[in-house]
Amino acid sequence: MGTIGAFLGGLVVAGVLMWAVRLGMTVRRREPRRPWPGQREPGRLPMGRKLHRLRRQRRS
């Protein structure tokens, strides 16, 4: 019984991991694409963002 339980547990874990990967791919498709480096002027902040907030995001 222990071997069968371990096998079934492994199948459950594999199924959950496959579901999580598919969910991540779906979420990633819905997100807007990041701009290429040449799409905005260098040295300019994106519209609508404060400088300290942008710096905090870059650190993490």
Image (cartoon, grey):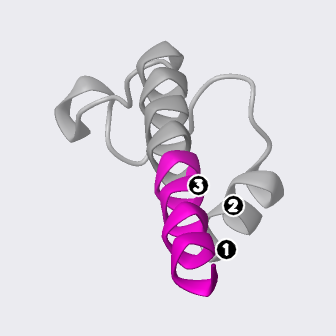
Counting residues from the start of the chain, the first of labels 3 and 2 encountered is: 3
Q: Secondary structure at mark 1?
A: loop
- Magenta stretch, residue numbers: 1-16
- Write down the residue under mark 1: 60
Label 3: how many Cα within 10 Å (few below 14, some 14–19, many 20+)? few
Amino acid on which the number 1 mark rests in the picture: Ser
Please indicate, yes or no, whether residue 44 appears anywhere in the rendered image: no
Mark 1 vs mark 3, foreground winner is 3
- Write down the residue under mark 3: 12
Which quadrant of the rendered structure holds the N terminus? bottom right
- Taking depth in this image into account, of 48 and 5 the one nearest to the observer is 5
- Write down the residue under mark 2: 57
34 lies above or below 60? above
**Residue 18 location (% of width, % of height):** 44, 44
Counting residues from the start of the chain, the first of labels 1 and 3 encountered is: 3
Amino acid on which the number 2 mark rests in the picture: Gln
Q: Secondary structure at mark 2?
A: helix
